[in-house]
Amino acid sequence: MSANHSLMAAGLDLGYGDRQIVSALDLSVPAGKLTVIVGANACGKSTLLRGLARLLTPSRGAVYLDGKPIHQMRTRDVATILGVLPQSPIAPDAITVTDLVGRGRYPHQGWFRRWTPEDDQAVAEALAATDTADLADRPVDELSGGQRQRVWIAMALAQQTDLLLLDEPTTFLDINHQVEVLDLLTDLVKERGRTVVVVLHDLNLACRYADHIVAMKAGQIVAEGRPVDVVTETVVKSVFGMTSRVVVDPISDTPMIVPIGRHHIEKQLA
């Protein structure tokens, strides 16, 4: 089992230029759990993840990794503990799948350490886990959007960090591969003791897979906790502006959101 590292934000303000997105936010990521951040578009989900991942410097407050301000830590020290898959990553021109996934091993190599059989094994396991082994020799820029997304996930997995942050990792994937990716992340948590934080758009998948769910609105956390405690019709209305019914998922016994469009509201109120 992996050692659990702590990740938390205190009084966090994040934004771009003069535009503030996240304000005075406090969050303690549960160790050894799968945390899913949800919310409407432009609510600050990805901005928060970028702050937690050290990709965006806060204007106020701080993110702490194992009690240390993450923005004051050396990049390599952070990279050996925390892996990140940002939204819409860009691969170098003509790089092959194997070479891109292999870049996930860089934090482990240091200045003088050469490529080892352990690195080969980590890359092979990441390719197998994401069902991309058959793409190993192909240039990344020739792949479909869904294939590229799975290759990027493989690179993050090859890094073999105890903390893994992923921004919308199911983007471009068909429903089968969405479920496979979330099953894989669940395996990392339950079987290897990893801590995983994911931004997702699909609220029902979030409820089914999350140990801990964080619901955001306008740069603030509206509610957080177990899906069964957090996801109610009132919260869905507040966070997404959507009228719904929340029922029990017949597969997982977690909340399942049934949207009610405007053409069906009158029928529901009748």
Image (spheres, grey):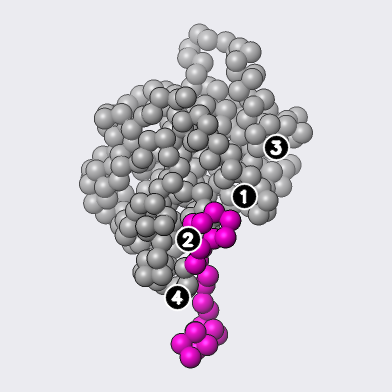
Indicate whether 241 appears above or below 185.
Answer: below
Q: Residue furthest bottom?
A: 270
Q: Label 3 crowding class (10 Å Cα cut-off): few <14, some 14-19, many 20+?
A: some
Spatial CA span between label 1 and label 2: 19 Å
Disc with the residue nearer the chain's start (1 vs 4): 1
User: Secondary structure under badge 1?
Assistant: helix
* Residue at mark 4: 243
The residue shown at (42%, 35%) is 32
Residue 26: x and y in percent read 26, 47
Please give the label number shown on residue 131. Answer: 3
User: Secondary structure under badge 4?
Assistant: loop
Circles 2 and 3: CB distance less than 8 Å? no
Spatial CA span between label 1 and label 4: 25 Å
Spatial CA span between label 3 and label 4: 38 Å
Residue 227: x and y in percent read 42, 55
Q: Quadrant of residue 223?
A: bottom left
Marks 3, 4: nearer the viewer: 4
Instruction: Count numbered badges in the picture.
Output: 4
Indicate whether 29 appears above or below 239.
Answer: above
Please indicate whether residue 240 sits to the left or right of residue 100 in the image.
left
Disc with the residue nearer the chain's start (3 vs 1): 3
User: Secondary structure under badge 2?
Assistant: strand
Spatial CA span between label 3 and label 1: 12 Å
The residue shown at (52%, 72%) is 259
The part of the chain drawn in magenta is 247-270
